[in-house]
Amino acid sequence: MISDTGVVTLYRPYVVHGLRVRSQLELPIPEAVGGLEEPDLTVRLQPAPAPEHGERMVAWAPCEIHGVDTTVHRGDSGTWIWQRSVATCHVHPDLRVVDIYPEEGADLEAMALLAMGPVCTYILLRMGVPVLHATAVVIGGRALAFAGSQGQGKSTMASFLLARGAQLLTDDSLPLRQVDGRVLGEPSMPLMKLWPETARYALGLFAELPHLLCGYEKRRLLLTDRWELVDRAVPIDVVYLLRRCDVSTCHNVQISVLPPQEAFTEILRHVANRAYLLPAEEARLVPTLAALSSHGRVRWLTYPSGFEHADLVYRSIVNDAEVEG
């Protein structure tokens, strides 16, 4: 609904990474059933341009073409997350309101991904909830997470397992909570970001999927009744750190357990948007990450690139994680 002044007034209810969100910006996920009486977060669309704030820059991401792609400023007025050609997002100091100021000609789906990704992730981190750049599934009673830098195959690995009966816990962002000495992974959104080849050869989806963003080759898959979703937090049994290798140098799958100190260092590297935090805020994440890094849960998974190795990779994971038949 748009008011006489051109301002969007309709709010839609969603659940994003466990946060109950009331949003004027339409998100590419199903709305929450029954609405939301008490949201954790309200997302409002505001007219451009974003106001001047004068806060200090704490993080930025480079762009090979334009020099800077993302900036994060923080101060008494809150946090200001700017993404080139998309929007400025103002996270209020209480972490309960986000105002979005679109850039001229900005793509609505890009704004939605910014809100669901970096913005909601930052809010969770500020709440003391670590969020790993990871994808996770549940199969045979075991919850398995896959972490790695871009291109290592997190979503591809999950797709291999989904095609063989797994349930998706989350794609790309894994919120963690420590409850009664156990580290639980929170369910996320029924949405996967896939390369066309992964959708085709890992999941058998030959129909054209919508682009994740305009002009971007990666696709958006909204999971339906075809795949089951995990709807509750579950203890994480294993975190696999992915190392995809060229088939000319790697022919077998190798899995090795990291000692706790090395595991903690590696897990810390995979905390999403950690650069946005101040040292005291980052310290709040340590107990949960340390617990996750113990008891041999974190393991290297080195595997040969190529969809033809899917069965080999699957069998190796099932045997290593002691997945029930």
Image: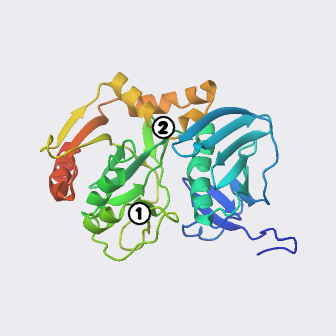
Name above or below for residue 272 compared with residue 3.
above
- Mark 2 burial class by Cα count in 10 Å: few <14, some 14-19, many 20+: many
Instruction: Report x, y in % for residue 209.
Output: 41, 72
- The residue type indicated by label 2 comes to Val
Is 218 situated left or right of 84 in this image?
left
Q: Which residue is mark 2?
A: 271
Instruction: Report x, y in % for residue 4.
Output: 87, 75
Q: Residue furthest left?
A: 251
Identified at 20% across, 50% down, the residue is 318
- Evaluate whether residue 189 shows in this view: yes
Identified at 52% across, 38% down, the residue is 130
Instruction: Report x, y in % for residue 184.
Output: 44, 44
Nearest-to-viewer mark from 2 and 1:
2
Q: What is the number of the mark on residue 229?
A: 1
Identified at 34% across, 24% down, the residue is 262
Q: What is the number of the mark on residue 116?
A: none
Q: Quadrant of the N terminus?
A: bottom right
- The residue type indicated by label 1 comes to Leu
- Mark 1 burial class by Cα count in 10 Å: few <14, some 14-19, many 20+: many
Q: Residue furthest top?
A: 261
Question: Could you give the CA–CA distance between mark 2 and mark 1, rounded to whole angstroms?
Answer: 23 Å
Residues tagged 2 and 1 counted as in contact (Cβ below 8 A): no
Q: Earlier in the sequence, mark 2 or mark 1?
A: 1
Where disc 1 sits, the SS reads loop
Where disc 2 sits, the SS reads loop
Q: Quadrant of the C terminus?
A: bottom left
Identified at 43% across, 54% down, the residue is 171
Is 7 situated left or right of 291 in this image?
right
